Image (cartoon, rainbow, N blue to C red):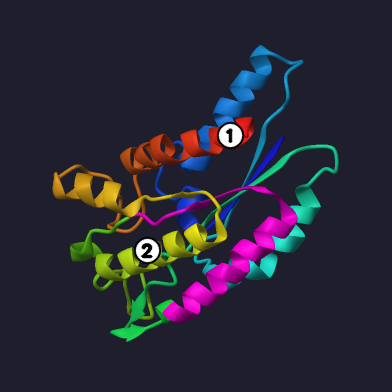
Amino acid sequence: MRILIFGDSITQGYFDSHGGWVSRLANDCHQKALKNLSADWQEVFNLGISGNTLNDILGRIKIETKARRLDDDMTIIVVAIGINDSVLINNKVYSEVYKFEEGYEKLVDTVLKLSDKCLFVGLSAVDEELTNPYPSSTTGKQYLNNRINLFEDCIKQVCERKSVPFVPIHDMFIGQLDGKQALLSDGLHPDNAGHSLMYEIIVPEIEKLFRS
């Protein structure tokens, strides 16, 4: 079994000493395989790239999936993208929600042609005191929770229309951040605790695909 996980810097695992929630899943799979060498090997490919947007994933998902897929092996595709599309740049919208929705529908259609085992992931929240503006940006980027929530809701609606699995993230992050739980390293990227939370939310949904 091959598990391909596409996304941005959060998927890539920035600011987590364990390499992010995807790396934790990969480690779990390797540990299980070493305990039972005759069992089906579950290989995880972290295909997160810092700064990626929906259009970036659309541009590479076909070729990267085909390069890693084996004809006689199950392929699971997980996509976690959208937070960089939600950004404002100097108070101007980077991507309109309706355009994102159109693109996400195209993404889901593309994924379904590559594999019927797929999962689409919602978006984590931010600490706006540290992301409005985001100081590491040289272009005036601003990450705001109301925008991020709109984009996650858009993802949810597309997944419902297409009858594909979706796992929400945003509300869980907001609830814990409102409770003063530290989940973010720089206001945008999850820290160790944030990636642990994402692992707890997402991995059980991926495991359901193993059995379906």
**Labels 2 and 1: the sequence-earlier one:** 1
What's the amino acid at mark 1? Answer: Ala
Where, by quadrant of the figure, is residue 130 drawn? bottom left
Question: Which residue is at the front of the view, 35 or 112?
Answer: 112
> Hey, which residue is sitting farthest left in the picture?
179
Stretch of the chain drawn in magenta: 98-124
Whether 177 is among the magenta residues is: no
What's the amino acid at mark 2? Answer: Asp
Residue 81, given in percent of the width and then of the height, sits at 49, 61
Q: Which residue is mark 1?
A: 26
Query: Looking at the image, is 162 positioned above or below residue 93?
Result: above
Q: Which mark is residue 130?
A: none
Q: Is residue 155 among what the camera can see?
A: yes
The residue shown at (48%, 57%) is: 9
Discs 2/1, front? 2
Quarter containing the C terminus: top right
Whether 118 is among the magenta residues is: yes
- SS of the residue under disc 2: helix
Specify whether 143 is left or right of 99: left
Residue 170, given in percent of the width and then of the height, sits at 32, 54
Query: Looking at the image, is 49 positioned above or below residue 184?
Result: below
Q: Which mark is residue 153?
A: 2
Q: Alpha carbon of mark 2 to alpha carbon of mark 1: how far? A: 28 Å
Quarter containing the N terminus: top right
The residue shown at (60%, 62%) is: 108
The residue shown at (63%, 68%) is: 58
